[in-house]
Amino acid sequence: MSYSASMEKQPKYVARIDNIYFINRIGTSLREATSNITTEELPENIRLLLRRLKRMDRAKLRKTD
C-alpha cells in the first residue's frame, strides 16, 4: 500500500454531530441529495449538519484569502 502526502492534508471528516463523523464525500452527497428540498422540510439534525458544513466552507474560504 502506498502512502501519499496529499492524503495527509485532507481531513478525514468535515463535520461531527454528537459522536457521528461525516467524511468529505458524504457531506457532498448530502448537499446534492437535499438541494431540491426546502430547508423547512428537512429534519432538524440534517439542517444542523448542513449549517455546520456551510460554516466550515466559509472558514476554509477565509483561510485561503
Image: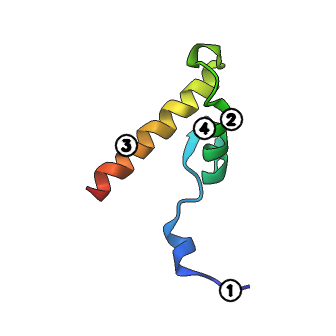
Q: Secondary structure at mark 1?
A: loop
Left or right of residue 54, residue 20 in this image:
right
Residue on which the image places disc 4: 31
Mark 2 neighbour density, 10 Å: few (under 14) some (14–19) many (20 or more): few
Q: Secondary structure at mark 3?
A: helix
Numbered tag placed on residue 2 in the rendering: 1
Q: Nearer the viewer, mark 4 or mark 1?
A: 4
In the rendered structure, which disc, 1 or 3, sits on the residue that comes first in sequence? 1
The type of residue carrying mark 1 is: Ser
Query: Disc number at residue 38?
Result: none
Q: Amino acid at mark 3?
A: Arg
37 horizontally vs 58: left or right: right
**Disc 4/disc 1 C-alpha distance (Å):** 31 Å
Rounded to the nearest angstrom, the CA distance separating label 1 from label 2 is 33 Å
SS assignment at label 2 = helix
- Residues under numbered marks 2 and 4 in contact, where contact means CB atoms less than 8 Å apart: yes
Residue 11, x across and y down, in percent: 53, 60
Q: Give the amino acid type for the residue marked by disc 4 in the picture.
A: Arg
Name of the residue lying farthest toward the front:
36
* Dot label at residue 33: 2
**Residue 58 marker:** 3
Q: Earlier in the sequence, mark 2 or mark 3?
A: 2
Residue at the spot x=30%, y=55% of the render?
Answer: 63
User: In the rendered view, would you say 35 is above or below 15?
Assistant: above
Distance from the alpha carbon under mark 2 to that under mark 3: 21 Å
